[in-house]
Image: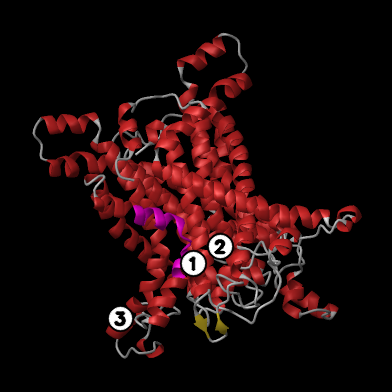
Amino acid sequence: MGLTRYAIRRLLQAVPVVLGLLTVTFVLANAIPGNPVEVMLGPSPSLEEVARIEARYGLDRPLAERYVNYLAGVLRGDLGTSLYFEVPVARKIAERLPKTLLLVVASYAFALLTAIPLGIVSATRRNTATDHVARVVSLLGVSTPSFWIALLLVLIFAHGLGWFPATDLVLPWADPATVDGAATSLGVLGQSARHLVLPTVALGTLQMASIARIERAELLSALSADYVTHARAYGVSERRVLTRHAFRNAQLPVITVIGLQLSSAVAGAVLIEVVFAINGMGTLVLTGIYNLDYPLILGTTVVFGTVFVLGTILTDVAYAWLDPRITYGEAG
Amino acid sequence: MAGNPRAERAEAAPGSDSPRVGWRATLATLGRDRSALAGLVVVATVLAVATVAFVDAVVFGFLGEFGFFASLGVEQYWLAKTVWISPTAEVAPELLPPVGLENAFGQGRLAHPLGTDDRGRDVLLRLLYGSRVAVQVALVATLVGAVGGSAVGAVAGYYGGWVDDALMRGVEVLYAIPFLILVLALLAVLQARDSLLVVTATVGVVNVPEFARLIRSRVLAVREATYVEAARAAGRSHLGVVWHHVVPNSLGPVVVQGTVRVGTAILVIAALSFLGFGVSEPTPSWGAMLATARDVMLQNLWFSLWPGLAILVTVVGFTLLGDGLRDTLDPRRSQ
């Protein structure tokens, strides 16, 4: 089976998972004991008002009908109407998702760009001072709460030194008229970069440290493998041993960890958005939860879940692409 | 970490397939590994402090509700009050800095070595008592996840076929929701924003997929082993094979994973209480302390340091111990 077929197969396998996800979130959201109508209208609303609102949001229909309607709606890209914002959930998510994606992608870029060199240096100069420093950095990185890093960064670099802003994110493609301190598109880009630095470092540190740890461990075991000893015995240079033999083989578990980190990256994004007061998906989820806005909780969870499933498939395909031994799924 | 003995050991026995090392041997090997030993010391200290806090806050609080113990003067935070002050007592002016330092609210005092929080409560004492929430939730949640996940993974891996498919698809759905979102959604649904029990249960459930996958992969490897075939041929039941051969062969990785997961769970709990879930005032917890610290960051920056450091040191302890255990119990995955 070719790689494309494998990718398609993985995508098809994801369909029941996403369906399960939709079902689970639907059941969860409809099990909320508090009455969302009460949240909207305050205590003791009139009966007519309640009936009007329930009819408007379809809350007066039987549960099974609501479930079918919900699934049909999702297929059309309709995630219902937010009770709190009183606008379509899909629109709200479309508004908020870019900032969160920007944050997560930036933190991954930061993590990969720092972790892989860190892991390589650590593994090739094992037990030197450089290795020890790199190991301590990655140990601290996996053990520090991201929101505390965020607090310290704000304290030092925003309030103390005033180098970077302490709140919000600016999208690089935003309209210059809506951005403070930027007159041109280039200015917006600069503001966007300035805003992105602290949240990216705060969120990316955990990913960086986890990837660096696994990179070092895997590279070390690859470097002590028989085929590497063999290559060395043939006089292959140490550099070539690393780049041609050890590195690629060591990347498989690294890719797995990168995929697994997606979940904590998303979780971290929620916290980082809170600390930096960023209007992203994380603060949107929290708004939904604090206000019992179940269409909003439902919609955001589904979107988070779908993004995560796609990320997992992406890592699986990357894994298969890198590992020639994988037969793209055994029979059965 | 210089001259790390575990590296040499790992090379000496790279193919060793037996994680069944006696506890005495495990401890002896750990004792020769300096970073693992440091981890062990940190973990033991935190566990000891948390145990004292648990007895004083939870057990004494519970006993104090009974006439007999109340007549003996036993009540919540009895120990802390007897030795020093209650972690919930508001005594000093607001936001004192640590000893020897000064801020807008006055000068640090010896009675409050690390200063006070925004309500004038002693930070050091709240820090010590805050360990209780972290340790209690993390230990129980990890246990729930390890036992539940191992059961699911063992059954799925051993029986294979549709059982495997059904269970692992279920696990995958659970896995497909980023864990914090899942925990938050569950807490919202159950309307239990400040119930520690519900937080523990949900974090435990969220831990299931990881252990299920781990055990399943081990079981898949063990299932085809000759000795399993021999046991089956000798007439041992499926359950017997799982219990006598599969479980002991998978215990090492579970212990290793469990130790690391306790550290991760502490981070999750800190995050949840930072967002205002799981604990409510006046119960001390590290995450909630950081949430307060964030609000008063500019008036007293020291207050932002301590809870974060406490989390950091604790998690480092569990990570180092987990790494050390991995080297002794699961030699193939070391370094």
B84 displayed left or right of A91: right
Chain under numbered label 3: A
Residue at mark 2: B271
Principal secondary structure, stretch drawn in magenta: helix
Residue at mark 1: A147
Local secondary structure at mark 3: helix
Q: Is residue A147 magenta?
A: yes
Q: Which quarter of the picture shows residue A245?
A: top left
Q: Earlier in the sequence, mark 3 or mark 1?
A: 1
B114 displayed left or right of A255: right
Instruction: Tell me the distance, in whole angstroms, between the alpha carbons under discs 2 and 1.
Output: 8 Å
Q: Please name whichever residue, B174 or B294, is drawn nearer the observer in this view of the structure.
A: B294
Residue at mark 3: A190
Q: Is residue A303 magenta?
A: no
Q: Quadrant of the C terminus of chain B?
A: top left
- The location of residue B140, given as percent across then percent down, is 64, 46
**How many labels sit on residues?**
3
Q: Amino acid at mark 1?
A: Phe
Q: Name the residue: 57% across, 52% down.
A: B46
Q: Residue furthest right?
A: B67
Q: Amino acid at mark 3?
A: Gly
Q: Residues within 10 Å of mark 2 (few under 14, many from 20)?
A: many
Q: Name the residue: 65% across, 77% down.
A: B120
Q: Is residue B203 visible?
A: no
Instruction: Tell me the distance, in whole angstroms, between the alpha carbons under discs 2 and 3.
Output: 31 Å
Please give the range of residues in magenta: A136-150
